[in-house]
Each structure stands twice: as structure tokens, then as C-alpha cells.
Image: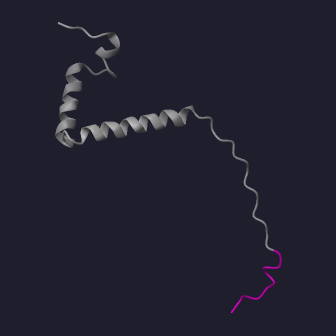
Amino acid sequence: MVTLPGKYAAFMGLGPTELIVILIILLVLFGGSKLPGLAKGMGQSIKEFKKASKEEPEVTKPAEPAAKPADSASKPPAA
């Protein structure tokens, strides 16, 4: 019997049997042809999330109030 190292033996508290059942359910729901695309999309999402969390937040300056147009209220509306 082969034993796995501690970090692979329990992924998020799930044993190998539970992981196999989850993989079979995913295979039934999405089919074999869509699983690689689904995994690729999840990988890209995780990569973007890690990238965004490492970046420093941008410092934004307060918005300046809009300039008031001169004499716009005194002009009659164009017909």
C-alpha cells in the first residue's frame, strides 16, 4: 500500500475517496471535452486574483469640482 505525504493526503480535509467522487460528478455534469477548458479558466482566474492581490492599491487624488460655465444661466435657450 502506498502512502502519500501529509500535504497530499488531505486536501482541504477531503480524503482520496471524496476527491474521486467529486471528479466523477464533475465528469458527468460537464463531460470530458469541457473539463480541460473549465480547469484552464479556473487557473487563469486564480492567477489574476493572485496578481491583483499582490499589486499595491492605486492612490487616487480627490476629484476636482466641475468648472462652472460663465454666463450659461443668463443666455436664452437656443430655438
Q: Where 6 falls versus 15 (above or below)?
A: above
Residue at the spot x=18%, y=32% of the render? 24
Report the side of 52 relative to 21 (left or right).
right
Tell me which segment is drawn in magenta: 70-79
Q: Quadrant of residue 68?
A: bottom right
Secondary structure mostly seen in magenta is loop
Q: Quadrant of residue 36?
A: top left
Q: Quadrant of the N terminus?
A: top left
| Colour mode of the rendering | one colour
Residue at the spot x=45%, y=34% of the render? 47
Q: Where 71 falls versus 22 (above or below)?
A: below
* Residue 18: % across, % down: 22, 24
Residue at the spot x=76%, y=88% of the render? 76
Q: Where 72 falls versus 24 (above or below)?
A: below
Q: Where 56 falls versus 75 (above or below)?
A: above
Report the side of 78 relative to 53 (left or right).
right
Residue at the spot x=73%, y=48% of the render? 61
Instruction: Report the front residue among 52 and 65.
Output: 52
The tally of labels here is 0
Report the side of 65 relative to 26 (left or right).
right
Is 64 magenta? The answer is no
Seen as rendered, the residue at the extreme bottom is 79
* Residue 69: % across, % down: 79, 73
* Residue 34: % across, % down: 24, 42
Is 72 magenta? The answer is yes
